[in-house]
Image (cartoon, helix red, strand yellow):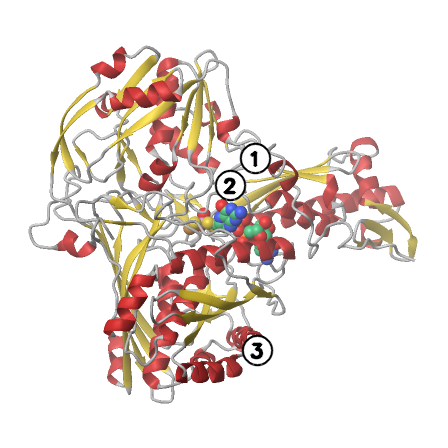
Amino acid sequence: MTQALDEIKIGGLGASRKRVEDDRFIRGKGNYTDDITLPGMLHMEILRSPLAHARIKSIDASKAWDIPGVHLVLTGEMMATRNLAWMPTLSYDTQAVLATDKVRFQGQEVACVIADDPYIAKDACEAIDVDYEPLPVIVNPKQAVADGAPVIRDDKENQPDNVVYTWEVGDAAGTDRAFEQADVISRLQLHYPRSHPSPIECCGSIADFNRATSKLTVYMTTQAPHIIRAAVALVAELPEHMIRIISPDIGGGFGNKVPVYPGYVCSILASILLERPVKWIEDKTGNLISTGFARDIYLDGEMALRSDGKILGVRMHCDADHGAFFSDAQPSKFKIGLLHSAFAAYDIPVAHLQARGTYTNKAPGGVAYRCSFRVTEAMFFQERMVQAAAGDLGMDQAAFRRMNFVADEDFPHRTPLGFLTDSGQYAKCLDVGLKAVGYEDFRKRQEEARAKGRLLGLGISTMTEPLGAGNSREYDILGIKMFDSAELKVHMTGKAIVRTGARTQGQGHETTWAQIVAHELGIPAEDIVVEEGDTDTAPFGMGTYASRSTPVAGAAVAMVSRKIRAKARKLAAHLLEVSEEDIEWELGRFYVRSAPDRGVTIQECAMAAYSNMPDGMEPGLENTAYYDPPNLTWPFAVYIATVEVDPATGVWDVLSVVAVDDCGVRINPMIVEGQIMGGLTEAYAMANMQFITFDAEGNCVGSNYMDYLLPTAWETPGFELHSEVVTPCPHHPIGAKGIGECAAVGGPAAFVNAVIDALSGTGVRNIDMPLLPDRVWEALTHHRDVSGAPPVRSDD
Ligand code: MCN
Ligand code: CUN
């Protein structure tokens, strides 16, 4: 008789275990950067530019220095004497830490004051006199490349214009041939607006340089502590073992906390100069106006179609607005991130993509916000284009998609733009979604309603997302290869601690990593603690973004558990006095094959590792694994929304949302559902209400929560989630694919497609997000597309 444990009961794979971190979060016992107070700590505030583009004629900080309680005023000039006025970005560009020559976007960091408290520091910032000479302002790529446009980055040699890069991929000639053979050519043009991750906790840091030990400790809101350590080592020229980056609890990251911000650098320099801890906590406006924006991309594409519905080829052009500095924190060699993952779910013979990046007078941004590096834009364009194409062919939306999907048996599938997708059951997901939403029935109701003047619409969106950078062959940040790590220490009582190179920001790693160990070793999840975010204790890793934690760090957790199991097997053989080959494993226990009653538990093996190991065996039960994935993981999802548009006002209400997510094996189904609901909420907000843009002077319109609306439970619709399709990832040790961003990536097109569907017959092909009532009303009333591209009027 064997006695295998019940995996769900011990909190293993598939258990909807309650999130252990929530015990402290919901009791107010989280420990965020701003909760930390160090003895002798000073406070830093940043003076930001009111203008989007201006030459700095002079900065007079004398009045600020005179304010009692002020310890230091940092300006660009002072930073320059230490070679720190500029810093390298993660995309091989440079970014001003504090402006010296010019300001290049509204909200740019101009000076910092360090004082006894943040209020004195803020007042002192206002006492700094900056003499600006305004320059012409650029707020979109068209203006950036226009004849005579002022060169924003005149600080750079060999930068005669505002073009950051041009890049292309695919087969241009082959695509031309496909278009020659097309029966129908469908075209779509749109702008995916800027959006902002807007985590509840803003960015911040506490730098603490100890002259006696020469050690610099920085507590900071970062999703990638080891990358920050590497960047500080390089920029500040401090040796790595003298730098400790601690990322305490994080109140949401969503990509906003990947880049390196000037505030971090200034607090570090201030602490080195003053030899006291210096805390910088950004305010909401500072966060909204200056940190890691996302999207802001102009997409223009064409699809070559055969009259029976087969897609023959795709052509895409993209203009990306990067703001004043190219600071994308993305690990691919491709300047435009993974935009060329567009159309990966469809079996398209040939495609070509051209991309151009431009500098504008806006805060640097580009990739960050639940996105996997422009996959959000890729999938949005894909699904908007597919809807337009089906419409142009007069084909049913669902049938057109099904006919063109990559078939289940065609994996691994090489996409026309160069990716290798791993697995999926696309048509099955679509069928589950259509059934759940009552597709046929809805189409009938839609027609009946139309006859009565009511506008109902249904939008389908699908997405497949390349998640889990790297492999190290193709992905790196500043030359540091992408992989991740896990360290597992099993104590003698069989309790354990696992540490990884990732950094949770609310995703629940403290819960799910323990579940992977429980699955591999049979140690109950509640006996395992998870720790991340301290570079002095965590193994080297590349942090958490691009939903890479489960695909990479999670895989490392499984692999290190297997190393531990291999050693425990030797201990079991020793304890049972048989040879290793005679031992079998079942969850939590080794036993003798010929005598299953004779066994030892994993806990007994752990004790033996410290008290009764065989002669010659290294004591202890600890190990580390570094995992370099063979490929990205490719989850798939279908999101379907139904809406009703009020023709009188343009207001639209969501009637239902169905989500079918296939992220392979789910470690914790409840956490996965939480991720999907969160992503759909953000998708709805982007489609419906979030407005952050720029007027002609480069003023950031919407840099406050009156305009940039965060969805609350009141306006967020209900979501019906489906988990019945599971395609295990063929190359991940436990078959899991990433999920953290899927719904935010695929969700927006479902809502927009639904509203455009409701407007069918009016000739409207596109309304740019957010689909504010006035835009929908304008489209309906004037039968025309509505662009949301900046500049907007300030009173919009
Ligand atoms: N999970 C699972 N089974 C799977 C896949 C994932 O149980 N098959 C679990 C994971 O173990 C983890 C969570 O779901 O607890 C998300 O996992 P994963 O997809 O690996 O994504 P990451 O942990 O790498 O999180 C990053 C992703 C990104 S890039 C953004 S942006 C985002 C997101 O997660 N930011 C978030 N979700 C967020 N959720 C919260 N609460 N806060 C953020 O800042
Ligand atoms: Cu692009 S936002 Mo997440 O990858 O941190």
Disc number for residue 435: 3
Return the mark for residue 541.
2
Task: Please say whether residue 483 is visible from this viewpoint.
Answer: no
Between discs 3 and 2, the one toward the N terminus: 3
**Residue 795 image point, x, y percent:** 23, 50
Identify which residue is drawn at 37% across, 21% down. Answer: 119
Task: Name the front one of labels 3 and 2.
Answer: 3
Amino acid residing under circle 1: Ala
- Viewer can see residue 411: yes
Dot 2 lies on which element? loop
Instruction: Check if mark 3's residue and mark 2's residue have beta carbons within 8 Å.
Output: no
Q: CA distance from mark 2 to mark 1?
A: 8 Å
- What number is the disc on residue 538? 1
Mark 3 Cα within 10 Å, few/some/many (few <14, many 20+)?
few
Residue 234 locus on image (x, y percent): 36, 31
**Picture coordinates of residue 105, whole percent (x, y):** 23, 40
Among numbered discs 3 and 1, the one appearing first in the sequence:
3
Q: Residues within 10 Å of mark 1 (few under 14, many from 20)?
A: many
Is residue 168 left or right of 453 when viewed as pictured?
Answer: left
Find out if the beta carbon at label 1 lies less than 8 Å from the nearest ligand 1 atom.
no
